[in-house]
Image (spheres, helix red, strand yellow):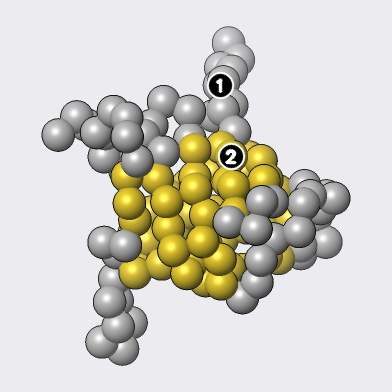
Amino acid sequence: MTETTTPRPSATVTFTNGSTVTVHGHELHTEPAWNGDADEEAFSGSIAPDRDPIPWPTASARIDRPGQAPFEVANAHVDISSRGRPMDFLTLIWPTGQRTVLAGDPIDPQTTEVH
């Protein structure tokens, strides 16, 4: 018997410069502190190479994920890598606690538990 999985719906990131990108296979996770720095959160996933221009090296953006409350981040570090694949990989990183959840369902984006 072959098990099939439904792909996670894509997220949308809208940057304050007006660029919008679709992020496939997205993840939101917390990274532990390094060298005494604050813990960080990271949002990442695959993006099309022929996308709208993305601000760099930092950006502010709204992130919309299906089934979750949208949120905004300010001055996130931006990393885009291609690694010779058909899709590029986007990572936005910001200090934990600097994510602003917008109006909507108060769901924790990591656990999906209602608070």
Q: Position of residue 51 (x, y in %)?
A: 79, 49
Q: Compare residues 18 and 7 and report the one nearer the observer.
A: 18
Residue 19's place in the image compared with 107, above or below, is below
Element assignment for label 2: strand
Which quadrant holds the C terminus?
A: top left
**1 vs 2, front mark:** 2
| Res 12 label | 2
Q: Residue furthest bottom?
A: 35
Q: Which residue is mark 1?
A: 5
Query: Does residue 62 appear left or right of residue 98 in this picture?
Result: right
**Snapshot quadrant of residue 30:** bottom left
Query: Does residue 109 appear left or right of residue 48 in this picture?
Result: left
Residue 38's place in the image compared with 6, above or below, is below
Residue drawn at the location 59% of the way across and 47% of the way down: 14
Q: Position of residue 68 (x, y in %)?
A: 38, 31
Q: Is residue 31 visible?
A: no
Q: Amino acid at mark 2?
A: Thr
**Snapshot quadrant of residue 10:** top right
Residue 106's place in the image compared with 38, above or below, is above
Residue drawn at the location 34% of the way across and 56% of the way down: 99
Element assignment for label 1: loop
Q: Compare residues 66 and 35 and report the one nearer the observer.
A: 66
Kindly report the distance in space between the C-alpha atoms of the residues bearing marks 1 and 2. Answer: 21 Å
